[in-house]
Image (cartoon, rainbow, N blue to C red):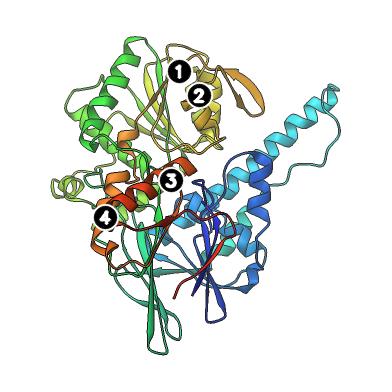
Amino acid sequence: MEITFWGAVRTVTGSMHELHVNGRRYLLECGLFQGRRKEALERNTRFPFAPDSVAAVLLSHAHMDHSGNLPSLVRRGFAGPVYATHATADLCDPMLRDSAHLHEKDAEYLNKRAQRRRALGIEPDAPPVEPLYTVADAEAVLPLLRPTAMRTPVVLDDGLSWEAYDAGHILGSAVLRIVEQRRGRRTRLLFSGDLGRKNLPITRDPEPPPPADYLVLESTYGARLHKPPEVVADKLASVINRTCARGGKIIVPAFAVGRAQQLILLLHELADAGRIPSIPVFLDSPLAVEITQIFRRHAELYDEQTHGYIERGQDPFQFPRLKLIRDVAESKALNDLRGPFVVISASGMCEAGRILHHLKNNIEDPRNTVLITGFQAAHTLGRKLVEKLPEVPIFGEPVRLRAEVETLNELSGHADQQELLAWMKPVAGALKGVFLVHGELAQAEALARAIHERYGLRAVIPERGQTFELD
């Protein structure tokens, strides 16, 4: 077995790792790379191998940085199975369609803007912007999805199988174990995907890892220690109350899968307890609305607290002040609505979708707050907001940042350094190798040092395109 690391290497987006086993090629993930437009286009359109040579893709979960470039892979010739848990397969359907729709709409917007600027003589002629992929490309992925139960070995080839274990990151997220058995030898590769945390809303805690020989471990927060998830309600209430006192709006970029539903549940609890004013809460994301319906269909994956709502005959994802926004006209109308109110919208890294319009219309007002609720990759608009740059580019134009920017890292769905170390403890003594991915270099280096100090293991931080033999 050989593994080559292509994506989410010394960064956190575009997860993609190539396995070579017995002459066949497999992919762990096929994620969308996000960042500078030119680099993202290059990474997402040019694969370092022939897509039609890939035998199968294994997905850990449905977030776009792990699944979002599947339409490009299929567009360029891949036709094999895409294995995922049942919930992940369900989530990929609307998420991939929505991603394609956003690519089409963003290309349309940029072309219209360029046409207007050329008419004014302030932009030279240039070829039209093409979407990365289309809705038709996304729909071509769906027949390839192969839903798979947790803790159920699936045969990929003679002597090669894989199985999934609950990762506790989002609904349906999985740790993957790939097992090769040939000529009396066995190689077990464990891939963490994105590892969750204990006591997060909705999701169950991560399962202990099964026995393994090699570990590919995420390192998103490899140098960080999170505050306990239990403090998040206090911080969320404080942000809302402070902004409401100014008469402002709370603009919340949130991943449509997982984060939006966690926020709704927390706001539900705060509203029931009378800890926040009785203000409107808008979920302005057709995708998040559809995803919430899928969450309702998978109550078997809820943690004990969320199950309590079901047992009481309540919907955890609905409360009186919450309004679901699907129509574009309704979304635009929010620009004319006076605060205070909360609007939750995608995308989580502020790279596409309706959130861009809400930010453009609101971040110049110091009464408002932008509440960042998830990790923001380098060079994304979300990272620029976290860094509180005086001006940020939105739709290619500079916009002054005068609104308050607050972060809610306590809600992170990624394990921190100590949580990662604790999770890997049951397998650390038998590991022949550890590879750190899905983390910026400083985070990965800090986690590598901690692993060496705790377990005496040398953790490798691979470079893009680097290959390792796993025996």
Looking at marks 4 and 1 on the same chain, the residue that comes earlier in the sequence is marked by 1
Badge 3 density bin: few <14, some 14–19, many ≥20, Cα 10 Å:
many
Badge 4 density bin: few <14, some 14–19, many ≥20, Cα 10 Å:
some
Q: Is residue 204 left or right of residue 459?
A: left
Q: Are marks 2 and 1 in contact (CB under 8 Å)?
A: yes
Which circle, 3 or 2, is nearer the viewer?
3
Which amino acid type is shown beneath numbered disc 1?
Answer: Leu
Q: CA distance from mark 2 to mark 1?
A: 7 Å
| Residue receiving disc 4 | 423
Which circle, 4 or 1, is nearer the viewer?
4
The C terminus is located in which quarter?
A: bottom left
| Residue receiving disc 1 | 337
Badge 1 density bin: few <14, some 14–19, many ≥20, Cα 10 Å:
few
| Residue receiving disc 2 | 333
Image coordinates for residue 149, horizontal then vertical, percent: 33, 69
Q: Is residue 423 left or right of residue 441?
A: left
